[in-house]
Image (cartoon, grey):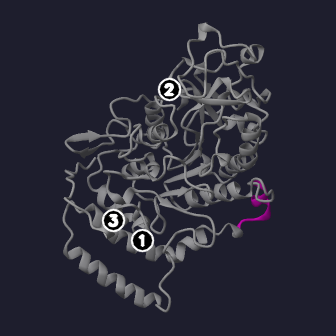
Amino acid sequence: MNEHNNSLPLAYSRRDLLLRAGSGFGGLALASLLAEEADAQDRKLKPEPRKAAKSVIFLYMVGGPSQMETFDPKPELERLQGQPMPKSFGSTIKSQFLTAGTPLLGSAWKFAKRGQSGIEVSDLFPHIATCADDLAVIRSCYTESFVHAPAMYQMMSGRTTMGHPSMGSWVTYGLGSASKNLPAFCVLPQPEGLPEGGSPMWDSAYLPAVHQGTILRSGSSPILHLKPPAGMSREQQRRLLDYVKEMNEQTLTPDGTDLSARIASYELAFRMQQSAPEAIDVRRETAETKTLYGLDDAKSAEFGTRCLLARRLVERGVRFVQLYSGGGPVSVQWDAHDNMLENHGKMAGMTDKPIAGLLKDLKRRGLLESTLVIWGSEFGRTPVSQNGKGRDHNPNGFTMWMAGGGVKAGTVFGATDEIGYRVVQDPVHIRDIHATILHLLGLNHRQLTFLHNGRNERLTDFAGQVIQKLV
Protein backbone atom coordinates (compact mmCIF):
# COMPACT_ATOMS: atom_id res chain seq x y z
CA MET A 1 0.00 0.00 0.00
CA ASN A 2 1.10 3.57 -0.42
CA GLU A 3 3.19 4.42 2.64
CA HIS A 4 2.68 7.89 4.01
CA ASN A 5 4.94 9.47 6.54
CA ASN A 6 2.34 11.19 8.69
CA SER A 7 3.37 13.71 11.28
CA LEU A 8 0.95 15.50 13.52
CA PRO A 9 0.58 19.25 12.96
CA LEU A 10 1.31 21.39 15.98
CA ALA A 11 -2.27 22.64 16.23
CA TYR A 12 -5.62 22.62 14.54
CA SER A 13 -7.88 25.54 14.05
CA ARG A 14 -11.49 25.23 15.19
CA ARG A 15 -12.55 24.97 11.56
CA ASP A 16 -10.02 22.21 10.82
CA LEU A 17 -11.11 20.28 13.89
CA LEU A 18 -14.74 20.38 12.78
CA LEU A 19 -13.79 19.25 9.32
CA ARG A 20 -11.73 16.34 10.65
CA ALA A 21 -14.59 15.36 12.94
CA GLY A 22 -16.80 14.86 9.92
CA SER A 23 -19.29 17.72 10.27
CA GLY A 24 -20.73 19.65 7.34
CA PHE A 25 -19.19 19.15 3.93
CA GLY A 26 -16.11 17.64 5.61
CA GLY A 27 -18.25 14.65 6.47
CA LEU A 28 -19.21 14.21 2.82
CA ALA A 29 -15.57 13.98 1.82
CA LEU A 30 -15.28 10.72 3.56
CA ALA A 31 -14.76 8.18 0.83
CA SER A 32 -15.22 10.07 -2.41
CA LEU A 33 -13.44 9.66 -5.70
CA LEU A 34 -10.19 10.83 -4.10
CA ALA A 35 -9.89 7.38 -2.56
CA GLU A 36 -9.92 5.93 -6.05
CA GLU A 37 -7.76 8.55 -7.75
CA ALA A 38 -5.08 9.11 -5.11
CA ASP A 39 -4.55 5.58 -3.90
CA ALA A 40 -4.99 3.61 -7.13
CA GLN A 41 -1.58 4.66 -8.51
CA ASP A 42 0.39 3.07 -5.68
CA ARG A 43 -1.98 0.30 -4.62
CA LYS A 44 -0.01 -2.94 -4.28
CA LEU A 45 -3.06 -5.04 -3.46
CA LYS A 46 -4.39 -7.14 -6.31
CA PRO A 47 -7.64 -9.09 -6.08
CA GLU A 48 -7.14 -12.83 -5.94
CA PRO A 49 -8.18 -14.94 -8.96
CA ARG A 50 -11.52 -15.94 -7.44
CA LYS A 51 -14.53 -13.65 -7.78
CA ALA A 52 -14.41 -11.22 -4.88
CA ALA A 53 -17.23 -9.39 -3.14
CA LYS A 54 -17.62 -5.75 -4.06
CA SER A 55 -19.39 -4.34 -1.01
CA VAL A 56 -20.29 -5.00 2.62
CA ILE A 57 -23.42 -4.43 4.69
CA PHE A 58 -22.63 -4.81 8.40
CA LEU A 59 -25.80 -5.29 10.46
CA TYR A 60 -24.53 -4.29 13.90
CA MET A 61 -26.73 -5.32 16.84
CA VAL A 62 -25.75 -2.82 19.55
CA GLY A 63 -25.47 -4.16 23.09
CA GLY A 64 -24.79 -7.87 22.61
CA PRO A 65 -27.53 -10.34 21.58
CA SER A 66 -27.59 -13.63 23.47
CA GLN A 67 -26.14 -16.55 21.52
CA MET A 68 -28.31 -18.97 23.53
CA GLU A 69 -31.47 -17.19 22.35
CA THR A 70 -30.52 -16.80 18.70
CA PHE A 71 -28.18 -19.18 16.81
CA ASP A 72 -26.48 -21.41 19.42
CA PRO A 73 -28.90 -23.92 21.02
CA LYS A 74 -27.95 -25.36 24.43
CA PRO A 75 -30.16 -28.25 25.62
CA GLU A 76 -27.89 -28.78 28.64
CA LEU A 77 -28.52 -25.21 29.74
CA GLU A 78 -32.22 -25.96 29.67
CA ARG A 79 -31.67 -29.02 31.85
CA LEU A 80 -29.57 -27.10 34.39
CA GLN A 81 -31.84 -24.04 34.58
CA GLY A 82 -32.08 -22.62 38.09
CA GLN A 83 -28.91 -24.35 39.30
CA PRO A 84 -25.56 -22.69 40.01
CA MET A 85 -23.06 -22.98 37.17
CA PRO A 86 -21.05 -26.22 37.65
CA LYS A 87 -17.42 -25.65 38.60
CA SER A 88 -16.38 -27.73 35.60
CA PHE A 89 -17.24 -24.76 33.36
CA GLY A 90 -14.88 -22.44 35.23
CA SER A 91 -15.69 -19.18 36.99
CA THR A 92 -17.95 -16.46 35.67
CA ILE A 93 -16.75 -13.05 34.55
CA LYS A 94 -15.96 -10.74 37.43
CA SER A 95 -18.79 -8.27 37.21
CA GLN A 96 -20.57 -5.89 39.52
CA PHE A 97 -23.82 -7.58 38.46
CA LEU A 98 -22.96 -11.25 39.04
CA THR A 99 -22.19 -13.03 42.30
CA ALA A 100 -21.10 -16.57 43.15
CA GLY A 101 -23.91 -19.08 42.86
CA THR A 102 -25.98 -17.06 40.39
CA PRO A 103 -28.35 -19.58 38.77
CA LEU A 104 -28.27 -20.63 35.14
CA LEU A 105 -31.01 -19.36 32.83
CA GLY A 106 -32.42 -21.43 29.98
CA SER A 107 -33.35 -19.94 26.63
CA ALA A 108 -36.61 -18.05 26.36
CA TRP A 109 -37.15 -19.45 22.83
CA LYS A 110 -37.12 -22.88 21.23
CA PHE A 111 -34.76 -23.93 18.45
CA ALA A 112 -35.45 -25.93 15.31
CA LYS A 113 -33.45 -27.09 12.29
CA ARG A 114 -34.12 -24.86 9.31
CA GLY A 115 -33.86 -25.34 5.56
CA GLN A 116 -31.96 -28.06 3.77
CA SER A 117 -28.81 -27.22 5.73
CA GLY A 118 -30.48 -27.94 9.06
CA ILE A 119 -28.92 -24.92 10.75
CA GLU A 120 -30.63 -24.44 14.09
CA VAL A 121 -32.23 -21.01 14.53
CA SER A 122 -34.49 -20.02 17.41
CA ASP A 123 -38.13 -19.04 17.16
CA LEU A 124 -37.00 -15.50 17.98
CA PHE A 125 -36.18 -15.10 14.25
CA PRO A 126 -38.95 -16.78 12.22
CA HIS A 127 -38.12 -14.74 9.10
CA ILE A 128 -34.32 -15.05 9.24
CA ALA A 129 -34.88 -18.78 9.81
CA THR A 130 -36.24 -18.99 6.26
CA CYS A 131 -32.83 -17.80 5.02
CA ALA A 132 -30.84 -20.42 6.95
CA ASP A 133 -29.42 -21.98 3.78
CA ASP A 134 -27.79 -18.65 2.91
CA LEU A 135 -26.04 -18.24 6.28
CA ALA A 136 -22.54 -19.12 7.45
CA VAL A 137 -22.91 -19.15 11.23
CA ILE A 138 -19.83 -18.69 13.42
CA ARG A 139 -20.55 -19.91 16.96
CA SER A 140 -17.04 -19.56 18.36
CA CYS A 141 -16.32 -15.82 18.37
CA TYR A 142 -14.48 -14.29 21.30
CA THR A 143 -12.93 -10.98 22.25
CA GLU A 144 -11.08 -9.41 25.19
CA SER A 145 -13.38 -6.78 26.68
CA PHE A 146 -16.77 -7.15 28.37
CA VAL A 147 -17.28 -3.36 28.43
CA HIS A 148 -19.40 -2.00 25.57
CA ALA A 149 -17.28 0.81 24.13
CA PRO A 150 -13.87 -0.95 24.13
CA ALA A 151 -15.49 -4.10 22.73
CA MET A 152 -17.20 -2.02 20.03
CA TYR A 153 -13.89 -0.42 19.09
CA GLN A 154 -12.31 -3.85 18.79
CA MET A 155 -15.13 -5.17 16.63
CA MET A 156 -14.90 -2.24 14.24
CA SER A 157 -11.16 -1.36 14.34
CA GLY A 158 -9.40 -4.40 15.76
CA ARG A 159 -8.29 -2.57 18.94
CA THR A 160 -9.98 -1.89 22.26
CA THR A 161 -8.91 1.76 22.22
CA MET A 162 -9.91 4.72 20.09
CA GLY A 163 -7.63 6.21 17.47
CA HIS A 164 -7.48 3.40 14.92
CA PRO A 165 -9.24 3.25 11.53
CA SER A 166 -12.56 1.47 11.33
CA MET A 167 -13.17 -1.56 9.14
CA GLY A 168 -15.13 0.49 6.61
CA SER A 169 -12.24 2.94 6.32
CA TRP A 170 -9.77 0.11 5.69
CA VAL A 171 -12.07 -1.37 3.05
CA THR A 172 -12.43 1.90 1.13
CA TYR A 173 -8.69 2.53 1.51
CA GLY A 174 -7.99 -0.86 -0.05
CA LEU A 175 -10.64 -0.85 -2.77
CA GLY A 176 -11.34 2.81 -3.45
CA SER A 177 -14.74 4.15 -4.45
CA ALA A 178 -17.06 2.49 -6.97
CA SER A 179 -19.41 5.47 -7.16
CA LYS A 180 -18.68 8.95 -8.44
CA ASN A 181 -21.78 10.45 -6.85
CA LEU A 182 -22.08 8.81 -3.41
CA PRO A 183 -19.71 8.32 -0.47
CA ALA A 184 -17.93 4.97 -0.42
CA PHE A 185 -18.63 4.43 3.29
CA CYS A 186 -22.09 5.17 4.73
CA VAL A 187 -23.35 4.84 8.31
CA LEU A 188 -27.05 4.36 9.15
CA PRO A 189 -27.52 4.84 12.93
CA GLN A 190 -30.52 4.17 15.14
CA PRO A 191 -32.71 7.32 15.17
CA GLU A 192 -32.77 7.34 18.99
CA GLY A 193 -29.02 7.83 19.21
CA LEU A 194 -25.54 6.52 18.50
CA PRO A 195 -23.97 3.39 20.01
CA GLU A 196 -21.83 3.87 23.11
CA GLY A 197 -18.66 3.66 21.03
CA GLY A 198 -19.77 6.71 19.04
CA SER A 199 -18.03 8.08 15.96
CA PRO A 200 -14.70 6.20 16.47
CA MET A 201 -16.62 3.18 15.16
CA TRP A 202 -16.57 4.72 11.66
CA ASP A 203 -13.54 6.98 12.00
CA SER A 204 -10.65 6.98 9.53
CA ALA A 205 -8.13 7.88 12.28
CA TYR A 206 -4.65 8.06 10.70
CA LEU A 207 -5.84 6.92 7.27
CA PRO A 208 -6.52 9.79 4.85
CA ALA A 209 -9.61 11.67 6.02
CA VAL A 210 -11.41 10.82 2.79
CA HIS A 211 -12.03 7.29 4.14
CA GLN A 212 -14.20 8.30 7.10
CA GLY A 213 -17.82 7.17 7.19
CA THR A 214 -20.63 9.52 6.21
CA ILE A 215 -23.72 9.45 8.44
CA LEU A 216 -27.11 9.22 6.77
CA ARG A 217 -29.89 10.20 9.17
CA SER A 218 -33.61 9.63 9.03
CA GLY A 219 -35.93 12.48 8.18
CA SER A 220 -36.12 15.10 5.43
CA SER A 221 -32.36 15.89 5.54
CA PRO A 222 -30.49 12.56 5.69
CA ILE A 223 -27.17 14.27 4.95
CA LEU A 224 -26.51 17.52 6.76
CA HIS A 225 -25.60 20.66 4.80
CA LEU A 226 -26.19 19.03 1.41
CA LYS A 227 -28.86 21.39 0.12
CA PRO A 228 -27.52 24.24 -2.04
CA PRO A 229 -27.52 27.77 -0.60
CA ALA A 230 -30.82 29.59 -0.97
CA GLY A 231 -30.96 31.82 -4.02
CA MET A 232 -27.86 30.36 -5.67
CA SER A 233 -28.19 28.67 -9.05
CA ARG A 234 -26.27 25.52 -9.91
CA GLU A 235 -24.11 27.47 -12.37
CA GLN A 236 -23.21 30.04 -9.69
CA GLN A 237 -22.42 27.28 -7.24
CA ARG A 238 -20.19 25.56 -9.82
CA ARG A 239 -18.20 28.78 -10.40
CA LEU A 240 -17.81 29.27 -6.64
CA LEU A 241 -16.57 25.72 -6.13
CA ASP A 242 -14.10 26.06 -9.01
CA TYR A 243 -12.69 29.19 -7.40
CA VAL A 244 -12.45 27.58 -3.95
CA LYS A 245 -10.77 24.52 -5.47
CA GLU A 246 -8.22 26.71 -7.24
CA MET A 247 -7.40 28.55 -4.02
CA ASN A 248 -7.08 25.31 -2.03
CA GLU A 249 -4.85 23.67 -4.62
CA GLN A 250 -2.38 26.53 -4.37
CA THR A 251 -1.57 25.47 -0.79
CA LEU A 252 -1.90 21.72 -1.30
CA THR A 253 1.16 19.69 -0.27
CA PRO A 254 1.91 16.01 -1.04
CA ASP A 255 0.99 14.94 2.50
CA GLY A 256 -1.99 17.28 2.86
CA THR A 257 -4.67 14.60 3.14
CA ASP A 258 -7.00 16.87 5.13
CA LEU A 259 -7.03 19.55 2.46
CA SER A 260 -7.34 16.93 -0.28
CA ALA A 261 -10.34 15.50 1.54
CA ARG A 262 -11.82 18.99 1.83
CA ILE A 263 -11.46 19.60 -1.91
CA ALA A 264 -13.01 16.21 -2.66
CA SER A 265 -15.83 16.84 -0.19
CA TYR A 266 -16.98 19.98 -1.99
CA GLU A 267 -16.94 18.21 -5.33
CA LEU A 268 -18.73 15.14 -3.98
CA ALA A 269 -21.34 17.25 -2.21
CA PHE A 270 -22.01 19.12 -5.45
CA ARG A 271 -22.61 15.86 -7.32
CA MET A 272 -24.65 14.40 -4.47
CA GLN A 273 -27.11 17.28 -4.60
CA GLN A 274 -28.50 15.64 -7.73
CA SER A 275 -27.81 11.93 -7.14
CA ALA A 276 -28.35 11.46 -3.40
CA PRO A 277 -32.07 12.37 -3.29
CA GLU A 278 -32.80 9.64 -5.82
CA ALA A 279 -30.61 7.08 -4.03
CA ILE A 280 -32.29 7.52 -0.65
CA ASP A 281 -35.86 7.83 -1.92
CA VAL A 282 -37.37 4.45 -0.96
CA ARG A 283 -40.78 5.67 -2.12
CA ARG A 284 -39.72 4.59 -5.59
CA GLU A 285 -39.83 0.93 -4.51
CA THR A 286 -42.82 -1.29 -5.25
CA ALA A 287 -45.43 -2.09 -2.61
CA GLU A 288 -44.29 -5.73 -2.69
CA THR A 289 -40.70 -4.75 -1.92
CA LYS A 290 -41.77 -2.47 0.93
CA THR A 291 -43.78 -5.32 2.43
CA LEU A 292 -40.81 -7.67 2.04
CA TYR A 293 -38.77 -5.33 4.27
CA GLY A 294 -41.55 -4.90 6.83
CA LEU A 295 -42.39 -1.30 5.98
CA ASP A 296 -46.09 -2.10 6.41
CA ASP A 297 -45.57 -2.94 10.10
CA ALA A 298 -45.05 -0.16 12.64
CA LYS A 299 -42.59 -2.31 14.62
CA SER A 300 -40.23 -2.98 11.75
CA ALA A 301 -40.87 -0.02 9.42
CA GLU A 302 -38.00 2.16 10.59
CA PHE A 303 -35.30 -0.53 10.55
CA GLY A 304 -36.79 -1.95 7.37
CA THR A 305 -36.43 1.43 5.69
CA ARG A 306 -32.74 1.50 6.57
CA CYS A 307 -32.24 -2.05 5.31
CA LEU A 308 -33.91 -1.09 2.05
CA LEU A 309 -31.73 2.02 1.88
CA ALA A 310 -28.65 -0.18 2.41
CA ARG A 311 -29.62 -2.26 -0.62
CA ARG A 312 -30.14 0.87 -2.71
CA LEU A 313 -26.72 2.17 -1.65
CA VAL A 314 -24.73 -0.96 -2.54
CA GLU A 315 -26.75 -1.19 -5.75
CA ARG A 316 -25.32 2.23 -6.63
CA GLY A 317 -21.72 1.43 -5.80
CA VAL A 318 -21.33 2.21 -2.09
CA ARG A 319 -18.57 -0.03 -0.75
CA PHE A 320 -19.40 -0.28 2.95
CA VAL A 321 -22.69 0.26 4.77
CA GLN A 322 -22.71 0.16 8.57
CA LEU A 323 -26.29 -0.28 9.77
CA TYR A 324 -27.04 -0.17 13.50
CA SER A 325 -29.86 -1.84 15.39
CA GLY A 326 -29.72 -0.10 18.74
CA GLY A 327 -28.27 3.12 20.06
CA GLY A 328 -29.08 5.89 22.48
CA PRO A 329 -31.14 4.70 25.49
CA VAL A 330 -30.62 1.15 26.77
CA SER A 331 -34.30 0.45 26.06
CA VAL A 332 -33.42 0.50 22.34
CA GLN A 333 -30.40 -1.83 22.54
CA TRP A 334 -29.80 -5.59 22.70
CA ASP A 335 -28.39 -5.11 26.22
CA ALA A 336 -30.76 -7.44 28.09
CA HIS A 337 -29.62 -7.13 31.70
CA ASP A 338 -33.09 -7.02 33.22
CA ASN A 339 -35.47 -9.01 31.05
CA MET A 340 -34.27 -11.19 28.19
CA LEU A 341 -37.75 -12.08 26.97
CA GLU A 342 -38.95 -8.50 26.79
CA ASN A 343 -35.74 -6.99 25.41
CA HIS A 344 -34.88 -9.51 22.70
CA GLY A 345 -38.53 -9.90 21.74
CA LYS A 346 -38.75 -6.17 21.11
CA MET A 347 -35.44 -5.86 19.23
CA ALA A 348 -36.11 -8.95 17.10
CA GLY A 349 -39.56 -7.62 16.25
CA MET A 350 -37.87 -4.53 14.82
CA THR A 351 -35.18 -6.38 12.82
CA ASP A 352 -36.17 -9.96 11.93
CA LYS A 353 -38.36 -9.35 8.87
CA PRO A 354 -36.22 -6.47 7.47
CA ILE A 355 -33.02 -8.54 7.65
CA ALA A 356 -34.67 -11.51 5.95
CA GLY A 357 -36.12 -9.12 3.38
CA LEU A 358 -32.68 -7.68 2.71
CA LEU A 359 -31.16 -11.13 2.13
CA LYS A 360 -34.00 -12.24 -0.14
CA ASP A 361 -34.02 -8.97 -2.09
CA LEU A 362 -30.25 -9.02 -2.66
CA LYS A 363 -30.49 -12.63 -3.79
CA ARG A 364 -33.29 -12.16 -6.29
CA ARG A 365 -31.53 -9.13 -7.79
CA GLY A 366 -28.27 -11.03 -8.22
CA LEU A 367 -26.51 -8.81 -5.67
CA LEU A 368 -25.97 -11.28 -2.83
CA GLU A 369 -22.94 -12.94 -4.40
CA SER A 370 -21.21 -9.56 -4.69
CA THR A 371 -22.43 -8.21 -1.33
CA LEU A 372 -21.13 -9.58 1.97
CA VAL A 373 -23.79 -9.27 4.69
CA ILE A 374 -22.55 -9.53 8.29
CA TRP A 375 -24.66 -9.86 11.46
CA GLY A 376 -22.96 -9.41 14.82
CA SER A 377 -22.22 -7.38 17.91
CA GLU A 378 -19.45 -6.59 20.38
CA PHE A 379 -20.00 -9.72 22.53
CA GLY A 380 -22.68 -12.16 23.69
CA ARG A 381 -24.42 -12.90 27.01
CA THR A 382 -23.75 -15.13 30.01
CA PRO A 383 -25.57 -18.44 30.60
CA VAL A 384 -26.11 -17.44 34.23
CA SER A 385 -28.97 -15.07 34.94
CA GLN A 386 -28.94 -11.50 36.08
CA ASN A 387 -31.87 -10.37 38.19
CA GLY A 388 -33.45 -13.74 37.48
CA LYS A 389 -34.59 -12.83 33.95
CA GLY A 390 -31.68 -11.12 32.20
CA ARG A 391 -28.08 -11.86 31.23
CA ASP A 392 -24.76 -10.04 31.64
CA HIS A 393 -22.02 -9.42 29.04
CA ASN A 394 -19.94 -12.37 27.81
CA PRO A 395 -16.87 -11.95 25.56
CA ASN A 396 -15.75 -15.58 26.00
CA GLY A 397 -18.08 -17.02 23.38
CA PHE A 398 -20.70 -15.54 21.05
CA THR A 399 -22.18 -15.89 17.58
CA MET A 400 -21.93 -13.96 14.32
CA TRP A 401 -23.05 -14.87 10.82
CA MET A 402 -22.22 -13.92 7.27
CA ALA A 403 -24.14 -14.33 4.04
CA GLY A 404 -23.33 -13.76 0.38
CA GLY A 405 -20.03 -12.33 -0.78
CA GLY A 406 -18.44 -15.71 -1.40
CA VAL A 407 -19.04 -17.37 2.00
CA LYS A 408 -19.91 -21.05 2.16
CA ALA A 409 -23.66 -20.89 2.71
CA GLY A 410 -25.56 -23.29 4.93
CA THR A 411 -22.62 -23.95 7.24
CA VAL A 412 -21.86 -23.74 10.96
CA PHE A 413 -18.32 -23.17 12.24
CA GLY A 414 -16.99 -23.53 15.78
CA ALA A 415 -18.72 -24.27 19.06
CA THR A 416 -19.09 -23.08 22.64
CA ASP A 417 -19.39 -25.38 25.65
CA GLU A 418 -22.64 -27.09 26.65
CA ILE A 419 -24.00 -23.98 28.35
CA GLY A 420 -22.76 -21.41 25.80
CA TYR A 421 -20.19 -19.75 28.02
CA ARG A 422 -16.76 -20.40 26.48
CA VAL A 423 -15.42 -21.34 23.05
CA VAL A 424 -14.32 -24.98 22.98
CA GLN A 425 -13.88 -25.62 19.25
CA ASP A 426 -12.29 -23.57 16.44
CA PRO A 427 -11.92 -20.25 18.32
CA VAL A 428 -12.42 -17.18 16.13
CA HIS A 429 -10.96 -13.88 17.30
CA ILE A 430 -12.12 -10.54 15.93
CA ARG A 431 -8.88 -10.36 13.94
CA ASP A 432 -9.84 -13.61 12.20
CA ILE A 433 -13.23 -12.11 11.35
CA HIS A 434 -11.50 -9.07 9.88
CA ALA A 435 -8.98 -11.17 7.93
CA THR A 436 -11.83 -13.22 6.45
CA ILE A 437 -13.86 -10.15 5.49
CA LEU A 438 -10.89 -8.60 3.68
CA HIS A 439 -10.15 -11.94 2.00
CA LEU A 440 -13.70 -12.17 0.68
CA LEU A 441 -13.23 -8.67 -0.77
CA GLY A 442 -10.07 -9.79 -2.56
CA LEU A 443 -7.70 -8.10 -0.10
CA ASN A 444 -4.79 -9.64 1.78
CA HIS A 445 -4.98 -8.45 5.39
CA ARG A 446 -1.20 -8.72 5.80
CA GLN A 447 -0.55 -6.45 2.83
CA LEU A 448 -3.23 -3.86 3.55
CA THR A 449 -0.98 -1.54 5.57
CA PHE A 450 -0.46 2.12 6.30
CA LEU A 451 2.73 3.65 7.68
CA HIS A 452 1.91 5.57 10.84
CA ASN A 453 4.46 6.76 13.41
CA GLY A 454 7.08 4.47 11.92
CA ARG A 455 4.93 1.33 12.05
CA ASN A 456 3.06 -0.41 9.25
CA GLU A 457 -0.42 -0.49 10.76
CA ARG A 458 -3.12 -2.86 9.58
CA LEU A 459 -6.69 -3.75 10.53
CA THR A 460 -5.63 -7.15 11.93
CA ASP A 461 -2.65 -5.67 13.83
CA PHE A 462 -0.13 -8.49 14.45
CA ALA A 463 -2.39 -11.53 13.93
CA GLY A 464 -5.49 -12.76 12.13
CA GLN A 465 -6.19 -15.89 10.08
CA VAL A 466 -8.67 -16.31 7.24
CA ILE A 467 -11.37 -18.81 8.20
CA GLN A 468 -10.82 -21.01 5.17
CA LYS A 469 -13.72 -23.36 5.94
CA LEU A 470 -16.14 -20.45 5.47
CA VAL A 471 -14.84 -19.40 2.06
Q: Where is residue 213 in the image (x, y as percent from the top left)?
A: 45, 57
Q: Give the range drawn in magenta.
A: 285-292
Does the magenta segment cover residue 261? no
Quote the CA–CA distance across marks 3 and 2. 36 Å
Q: In which quarter of the image is residue 78?
A: top right
Res 36 seen here: no
Tell me if residue 166 comes above or below residue 147 in the rendering.
Answer: below
Dot 1 and dot 3 residues touching (CB under 8 Å): no
Does the magenta segment cover residue 289? yes
Q: What residue type is labelled 1?
A: Phe
Residue located 48% across and 74% down the image: 225
Residue at the spot of label 3:
261
Tell me if residue 370 comes above or below residue 71 in the rendering.
Answer: below
Q: Quadrant of residue 34?
A: bottom left
Q: Residue 428 carries which label?
A: 2
Chief secondary structure of the magenta span? helix
Tell me if residue 101 comes above or below residue 124 in the rendering.
Answer: above
Q: Is residue 90 left or right of residue 15?
A: right
Q: Which of 49 and 323 is in front in this view?
A: 323
Residue at the spot of label 1:
25
Residue located 51% across and 22% down the image: 427
Q: Position of residue 56 (x, y in %)?
A: 53, 48
Quote the CA–CA distance across marks 2 and 1. 39 Å
Secondary structure of the residue carrying numbered label 1: helix
Quote the CA–CA distance across marks 1 and 3. 10 Å
Single out the mark in the foreground, 2 or 1: 1
Point out the tag, 3 or 2, that comes first from the N-terminus: 3
Point out the tag, 1 or 3, that comes first from the N-terminus: 1
- Binning the other alpha carbons within 10 Å of mark 2 as few (below 14), some (14 to 19) or many (20 upward) gives many
Point out the tag, 2 or 1, that comes first from the N-terminus: 1
- Binning the other alpha carbons within 10 Å of mark 1 as few (below 14), some (14 to 19) or many (20 upward) gives many
Count the numbered circles shown.
3
